[in-house]
Image: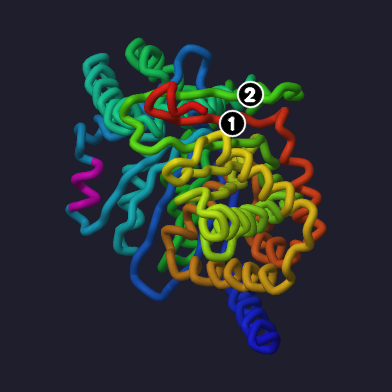
Amino acid sequence: MTRLFAALAIMMSAIAAQAQEQVTTFTLDNGMDVAVIEDNRAPVVVQMLWYKVGSADEPAGKSGVAHVLEHLLFEATDVLESGEFSATVAANGGRDNAFTSYDYTAYFQRVASDRLELMMQMESNRMNNLRISQDDVETERQVVLEERNQRTENSPDALAREQIRAALFQNSRYGLPVIGWKHEVEQLDLQDTLDFYDLYYSPNNAVLVVAGDVEPDEVLALAEKYYGVIPAEEQLPPRERPQEPPQRAERRITYVDERVSQPYLVRSYLAPERDPGAQSEAAALVYLAELLGGSSFTSALGQALQFDTQTAIYTNASYSGSWLDDAIFSFAVVPSEGVSLTDAETAMDEVISAFMEAEIDPERMESIRTQLRASEIYALDNVQGLAQRYGAALSQSLTVADVQAWPEVLQAVTEDDIKAVAAKVFNRDQAVTGWIVSSQEEAR
């Protein structure tokens, strides 16, 4: 078995090395960054334009403006009618969409590679020539409010997560929902969206990622033709955000909603994110999440609470390090019928304490290494996924070198690394524990 793991690791390392050679980067004279990922296996190309601005960059009192503006970019420009952008993509056999996160707003099209120039022409046009009215804003604002109703207001789980996040982040705007607080979205107007658009939708605040059947020099020529002529935004402010102060007290919330079908608990800790040239703690946290709450058959929580004692019907530990600022490490436990939340939380804490005191199984570590290596290799088959990986990273201060180093950073994680970062993260003073119940009687 050891020989199999070694052979697999050598093969995967070789494939990964070849893939790394296919990423080419440029910076246009106006400050716009361009990354080209070559994959000539199919005559398809993905263009993704990433603006380095998200909901965590919004002005105070204007939550939701980044997401509303994302919707508005499909309205009219000086040369396109409202809806014409997506209609043109579809007429050319492609598909397009957009999404907003805390750290970025991204727009993409997937089309035949010979349609790339048309996509650049249209995408560059709406970077600087959006033509919207107050009626447009009111229409899209109502669309966003309905989206919030469906995804958040109608979901007790989503509302509970919103409250937990608001309690976890005391100063950072990560504590606000990406979609915005309802009462603030209702007040957004035309000037709010135009101010945000004029300041942040500029080439020196954008990353263009083109992936697929393309040549880097051709992409550069097209980027210079369509994006390079757009002036840089001279008033673009430094990306400085409110940071978390030292957190000195544990927080607990009980969210009561009669729509909750099964009581459960969640605990979220502040955790290190992936930083340029410093990704080792984030990599160790990936292992920690898998060891404690990955598969219910092999994780510490699953074995102890679901199988050994039948204290819970579901357990999980999760971590994602892809943030510009502080990340989150979370646990979730759904107790079995007749088990109180108090007992379930006590059992969870006992598993965490036992994990910290015991040795980590080397065979389990090797299994996780192989799974992670395989997932990194399989990801190379998804051109749009690659474009998204690089675009998100470059929008969150990471570099191409960081992205390409990540698989080996993951492989280098040791048991000591995991224990060290766990001791750092598992500080109850920088955590929020939430009980989600249908009635106060269940909050025990």
* Residue 279 percent across, percent down from the top left: 72, 52
Quick check: marks 2 and 1 in contact, CB under 8 Å? yes
Q: Is residue 79 positioned above or below 11 on the image? A: above
Q: Callout 1: few (<14), some (14-19), or many (20+) C-alpha neighbours within 10 Å?
A: many
* x and y percentages locating residue 281 in the rendered image: 74, 50
Comparing 173 with 190, the one in front is 173
At 53% from the left edge and 37% from the top edge, which residue is drawn?
266
Q: Which of the image's four quarters has the N terminus?
A: bottom right
Please state which amino acid type lies under the numbered disc 1.
Thr
Report the front residue among 310 and 427: 310
Q: Is residue 437 above or below residue 277?
A: above
Task: Report x, y in % for residue 177.
Answer: 46, 27
Q: Residue at x 75, y 22 (%)?
A: 248
Q: Nearer the viewer, residue 157 or 385?
A: 157
Q: Is residue 400 visible?
A: no
- Find the magenta span and give its range: 85-90
Residue located beneath label 2 in the image? 251
Specify whether 266 is left or right of 437. right
Q: CA distance from mark 2 to mark 1?
A: 7 Å
Q: Main secondary structure of the magenta part?
A: helix
